[in-house]
Image: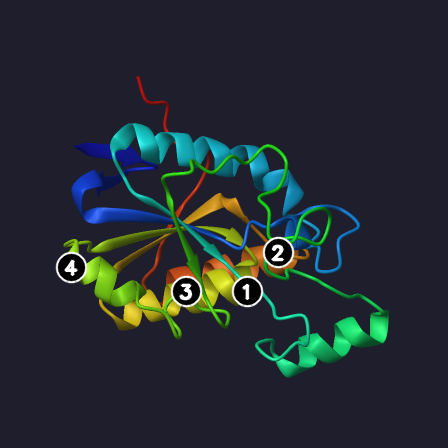
Amino acid sequence: MITVWDGCRIDSERSVLLMIDMEKAFVEPGAALCIAGAKATVPSCMRAVKWARACGIPVIWVKRIYAADGSNMEKPRWEALQKAGWKDVLTPDSTGLNSIEEPDGLVRDPGEQVMIKPRYSSFFGTDLHDQLQEKGIDTVLMAGTTTPNCIRTTCYDALSYDYNAVVLEACCSSRSEQVQRANMEDMEMVGAVILHGEAPTVE
């Protein structure tokens, strides 16, 4: 199935949607790692997920899970959380404000894959590339938070592996509009396709 979004032709049989780090700890206001623009993107993310499902595009929910002792967390982040007095952020099986759960309004199908990444990029320290190669995927659609960190590093790694890197702008978020705009421009300059607006309506 071929669908068109913002003038870009997308082959559902050769594409995958990565929903990156849309977890309560990053999204919900008041959470330890809340990104200012993340909550507002939840409806757009859900619309993109529904569009992908309708088109037969696999959705992979890429997440971070932190050990309670911070042993698998970037050192500066661990130190910042400790200094602020936060505990049990994104720990395994966590629930509530600082948890690994999807934010309110974003619903994961139980049958959809969850992939845990140890660092910013969805490719770093995971078997994502091998999985996509086995399935004949050549186009990686990216949504989630944050644009300058996890989206951007995933985008650059996708380009390095020669995938068509497609960023869903309305489904991504940053701490400020200026940061969002600058990073979108940078990714576009190196060859990523930036899709604007909402996901197409699928009959």
Return the disc, 4 or 1, that comes first in the chain's sequence. 4
Q: Residue at x 64, y 57 (%)?
A: 178
Q: Position of residue 174 (x, y in %)?
A: 62, 56
Report the label total.
4
Q: Residue at x 14, y 54 (%)?
A: 136
**For the residues marked 4 and 2, what is the alpha-carbon distance in whole angstroms?**
33 Å
Quadrant of res 1: top left
| Up/down of 135 relative to 110, above or below | below
Q: Amino acid at mark 2?
A: Ser
Quadrant of res 165: bottom left
Q: Return the residue at label 1.
A: 148
Residue at the front extreme, as displayed: 93
Determine whether label 2 and label 1 are within 8 Å by CB.
Answer: yes
**For the residues marked 4 and 1, what is the alpha-carbon distance in whole angstroms?**
29 Å
Q: Return the residue at label 2.
A: 174
Q: For the residues carrying marks 3 and 2, which lies nearer the camera in this image?
A: 3
Q: For the residues carrying marks 3 and 1, which lies nearer the camera in this image?
A: 3
**For the residues marked 3 and 4, what is the alpha-carbon distance in whole angstroms?**
17 Å
Q: For the residues carrying marks 3 and 4, which lies nearer the camera in this image?
A: 4
Q: Amino acid at mark 3?
A: Ser
Q: Residue at x 30, y 27 (%)?
A: 54
The mark found on residue 134 in the picture is 4
Tell me: 177 left or right of 113.
Answer: right
Q: Residue at x 66, y 76 (%)?
A: 70
Q: Position of residue 47 (x, y in %)?
A: 46, 31
| Up/down of 82 relative to 116, above or below | below
Q: Return the residue at label 3.
A: 122
Return the disc, 3 or 2, that comes first in the chain's sequence. 3
Tell me: 46 left or right of 94.
Answer: left
SS at circle 2: loop
